[in-house]
Image: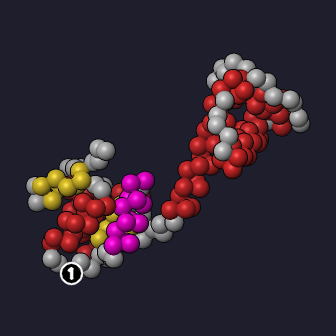
Amino acid sequence: MWTAPARSCGRRIASEPAALIGWFASLGLDLARIGLEAGPLSQWLYAAMKEAGLAVELLETRHVRIALKTMPVKTDRNDARGIAQLMRLGWFRPVYCKSMAAQETRALLTALYEAANVILTRPVKGGGLNSWAMKLAKRAGMKKAKVALARKLGVILHRMWIDGTPFDARRAACPAPTAA
């Protein structure tokens, strides 16, 4: 897996929890706080570093951007130095990091909505779900139809998971009975 490397004294360190935790341990310092700018990767790093017992804080992205925008040259190294300075001075706003379960639930809901969006907006041959959702869209609007289709996809996937039913492309292409 490729990851964006972090730099340390001219040395590259993978942006992975194990590598960063090991590097912080190798410093032999009593670290008061470690700052991470909030983002998708930082939540993963935050959870692992917190579990390892490190004093890590997630920083509000907009607050960091405003504090660092006066820097003449914008580089990753300068950003890291700027975040370190914010941490030393205490000029940061911590952000709450949602639990992994909450993040996974959010990702699942987003994926279901995106799947519903694709089914409704891209030409797909056959499929009872598409025709069912399009009829609903005519009655209630496209946004409600996408939400209803995402929920229906969630129910179908859950039932398949519980039953252990494998996906059957031939069956998926056949129109399903219409129900309003």
Left or right: 175 in relation to 2 = right
- Residue at position x 56%, y 61% from top? 102
Left or right: 162 in relation to 139 = left
Range shown magenta: 40-52
Q: Secondary structure at mark 1?
A: loop
Q: Is residue 32 visible?
A: yes
- The residue tagged 1 is 30
- Residue at position x 54%, y 55% from top? 104
- The percent position of residue 118, horizontal first and vertical second, equals 63, 31
- Residue at position x 30%, y 56% from top? 16
Specify the quadrant that holds the C terminus.
Answer: top right
Residue 50 drawn in magenta = yes
Q: Nearer the viewer, residue 156 or 82?
A: 156
Q: Nearer the viewer, residue 20 or 169?
A: 169
- Residue at position x 35%, y 57% from top? 65
Q: Residues within 10 Å of mark 1 (few under 14, many from 20)?
A: few
Q: Is residue 72 visible?
A: no
Specify the quadrant that holds the N terminus.
Answer: top left
In the displayed structure, 23 sits above or below 167; it is: below
- The percent position of residue 47, horizontal first and vertical second, equals 41, 66
Quarter of image, res 139: top right
